[in-house]
Image (cartoon, helix red, strand yellow):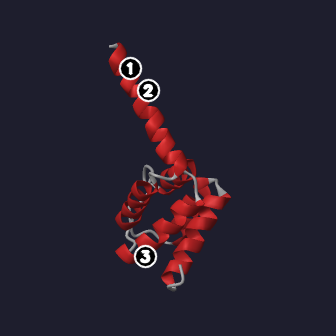
Amino acid sequence: MRKLLLWIVVLAVLAGGALFSGLANPLVEMQVKGALVESGIGEKRAACMAERMVDRLTIPQLWKLRQGMAAQAGEPEEGYGLGELIKRLDRVDDGEAVAVLTTSAGLCAIGIG
């Protein structure tokens, strides 16, 4: 039991170190890209946006953005309009995360991201 606890602590320290040092950025970027593609954004644009977002936002900000943009009870999963988008962005309650998301979407859409 003691060995198991030691291994769990060592693993947690290594994972925290990888996240803090940026070694886990490719994995995080892959997760962000997957979430963007799942939400209906094209593969190329999602890759561009994910790279910018991972470089500019922290893991907690990315998590907050994902949770805020997720459909809640009674909301459409996809195919929603501008009003629903604004409601979800407001729910994120992190101005920097919303700014990075929107600028990334705009810059990557016109090809200069």
- Work out whether residue 86 or residue 105 is closer to the camera in this orientation and state it: 105
Q: Which residue is mark 1?
A: 5
Image coords of residue 74 (percent x, y): 42, 53
Q: Which residue is mark 2?
A: 9
- In this view, the residue farthest toward the right is 95
Q: Earlier in the sequence, mark 2 or mark 3?
A: 2
Image coords of residue 94 (percent x, y): 64, 55
User: Mark 3 and mark 1 in contact (Cβ < 8 Å)?
Assistant: no
Q: Which residue is mark 3?
A: 45
Label 1 neighbourhood size at 10 Å, few (<14), some (14-19), many (20+)?
few
What separation in Å lies between label 1 and label 3 (alpha carbons)?
A: 42 Å
Q: Helix or strand or loop: what does disc 2 sit on?
A: helix
Label 3 neighbourhood size at 10 Å, few (<14), some (14-19), many (20+)?
many
User: Mark 3 and mark 2 in contact (Cβ < 8 Å)?
Assistant: no
Label 2 neighbourhood size at 10 Å, few (<14), some (14-19), many (20+)?
few
Picture quadrant of residue 47: bottom left
- Work out whether residue 58 or residue 81 is closer to the camera in this orientation and state it: 58
Picture residue at 38% right of the left edge, 77% below the top: 44
